[in-house]
Amino acid sequence: MKQRANSNLKKWTAIFITIIVYYVIHEGAHLILALCYDVFERIRIVGLWGVQIVTTDGELLGYRLAIFSGISSIVTIVIGYLLYVLTPQILKLRTKSFIILMYYITACFLLLDPIYISILSSFIGGGGDINGIVTGLGIPEVPIRMVFGCIALLNIFLFTRKISPQYTKLFRR
């Protein structure tokens, strides 16, 4: 019983840290670009889980708006791919808690933005990044949703067939 409680604590701690790491990286990419474009106004907390980088009105237009809106998703996905490549090295580490954390971070970075942009943004969150991408590029949402949908399908396959089995194998020992 105590071992199961300890395991659950490690899992939920890893999930909580994953959420924080995701926000730091995702919103950090927006923040860095806002500072580079000299349009940063403030950081806004929205509800319990929402964080947004607020920019000065009307300053981000065209490709700059598309890049500002899309860069955070690109960064998290690329980090997810990097973690996939590093999975064999991660699994050799001695700290089980850190390995658990890397599992959740890898899953989050590979799956969250592609699934959110391709599907979930239609139902929750008001669109967020996809609105900036399509407005900046001057194109409809459908092509962007399709691209991110394809990335989501690829990443789901990658995670379920390549990454998760490696972690499962390690934790069954």
Image (cartoon, rainbow, N blue to C red):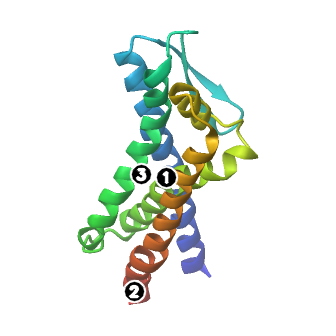
| SS category of the residue bearing label 3 | helix
Mark 3 or 1: in front is: 3
Whichever of labels 3 and 1 marks the residue nearer the N terminus, that label is: 1
Residue 16 in sight here: no
Residue 28, image x and y in percent? 42, 32
Q: Residues within 10 Å of mark 1 (few under 14, many from 20)?
A: many
Q: Residues within 10 Å of mark 2 (few under 14, many from 20)?
A: few
Which residue position is annotated with label 2? 169
Q: Nearer the viewer, residue 26 or 114?
A: 114
C-alpha span from label 3 to label 2: 24 Å
Decide: is 58 above or below 140: above
Q: Earlier in the sequence, mark 2 or mark 1?
A: 1
Residue 67 can be seen in this image: yes
Q: What kind of residue is marked 3?
A: Ile
**Residue 142: % across, % down:** 63, 46
Q: Residues within 10 Å of mark 3 (few under 14, many from 20)?
A: many
Camera-side residue: 98 or 85? 85
Q: Is residue 49 above or below residue 158?
A: above
In the displayed structure, does residue 134 sit left or right of residue 171?
right
Height in image: 41 above or below 138? above
Tell me the residue that label 1 is attached to.
18
Q: Identify the residue position indicated by label 3 in the image.
A: 77
Report whether 133 appears left or right of 120. left
Q: Position of residue 16 (x, y in %)?
A: 55, 52
Residue at 40% x, 74% y is: 163
Amino acid type at image mark 2: Lys
Farthest-out residue, right = 123
Q: CA distance from mark 3 to mark 1?
A: 14 Å
> In terms of secondary structure, where does tag 2 sit?
helix
